[in-house]
Amino acid sequence: MDIKQELIMNVAQKCFNSYGIKYTSIDDIVKECKISKSTFYKCFSTKENLVGEMLKYSSNKFLNQSILIDEDNQKTPKEKLKEKINIILEYLESNRYFNVHILGEFSEINGKPVEEIKNIIKSRLVKVYYDSLIEVYGKEIKPFIWEVIFVIDSVTHEFDLIKRLNKKELDKDYIFDLILRQLELNIENLKHNKCIITENILYTVEKDNELEIEIDLHERFLETTKDIKVKIENDNLNKKLNEAILKVEQEYKLKNYNSLMMDAMIAYLEKEQALKIEIDKLKSIKFQLGDDTIDRQ
């Protein structure tokens, strides 16, 4: 994305938040940007196309922030969860009016129904909670994970509402501590009660979020193995390391996530200090893939 596109999107979001999408024209946007209409059309074909790209940009930015938090090995799982709650609050604040206006203005954007787009965005928010909650509280919460997500999502949205109605900033540590306290109280209660909430309550239409989470894990696994191969080549590391990562990929293709070969090759790669960050990430993803395989059996 170039500088002009980013400028137009930032200015457009301010205009949409202030006046609504329906009452903001392309003329209004180019005037605020101090650019010509022809420059606008070189970047975006229509106002609908602009809105679609804005949604994609903000959603991808949010997801990338979440991935960076996951990859920070200096933070504890609970610290990572707090950071994720923070980026969700920031996302809600910056996109609140924009998203509401979209629902009132468009039935579809760039050929895709708005309801489907809304569910994709919601799925990304849910996934950010899902991974971190398992990491913080362990696999034992899986039987009632959707109730836990419902609680944390509801409390986070409630704080966003409180901030908006009171028009004042709340101490972030206070917000995080209270959310986590409510979460932990609910987890203790849920351990002794039957689960009554499924993922479908979080969407306006049914969708297989478990499948989407698994697809994302596969993408991250392949990206990480690619990063390892590039690092081995660029840093002129032992050629046997490259053979090891190729065997890891072979086991992955066979879905042997918990095989002795997979574990042995990762253990061999782990001895190379230069690959520590990538291998830690790979092990985390492999664990989740292997865990999902066991759950499905």
Image (cartoon, rainbow, N blue to C red):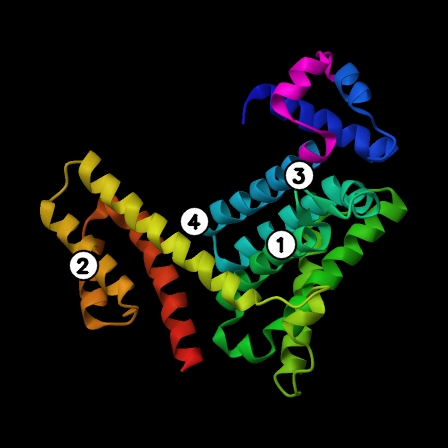
Among numbered discs 1 and 3, the one appearing first in the sequence: 3
| Crowding near the residue tagged with mark 4, few <14, some 14–19, many ≥20 C-alpha atoms within 10 Å | some
Image: magenta residue range: 33-49
Query: Mark 3 near mark 4, Cβ–Cβ under 8 Å?
Result: no
What amino acid is found at the position of numbered circle 3 in the picture?
A: Gly
Q: Position of residue 44 (x, y in %)?
A: 65, 26
Q: Would you say 246 lies left or right of 200 here? A: left
Q: Residue at x 50, y 59 (%)?
A: 77
Asked if the magenta segment contains residue 41, the reply would be: yes
Q: Position of residue 21 (x, y in %)?
A: 82, 35
Q: Residue at x 58, y 20 (%)?
A: 3
Q: Would you say 67 lies left or right of 175 here? A: left
Q: CA distance from mark 2 to mark 1?
A: 34 Å
Q: CA distance from mark 3 to mark 4?
A: 29 Å
* Residue 52 marker: 3
Query: Which residue was labeled with disc 1?
Result: 120
Among numbered discs 4 and 1, the one appearing first in the sequence: 4
Among numbered discs 2 and 4, the one appearing first in the sequence: 4
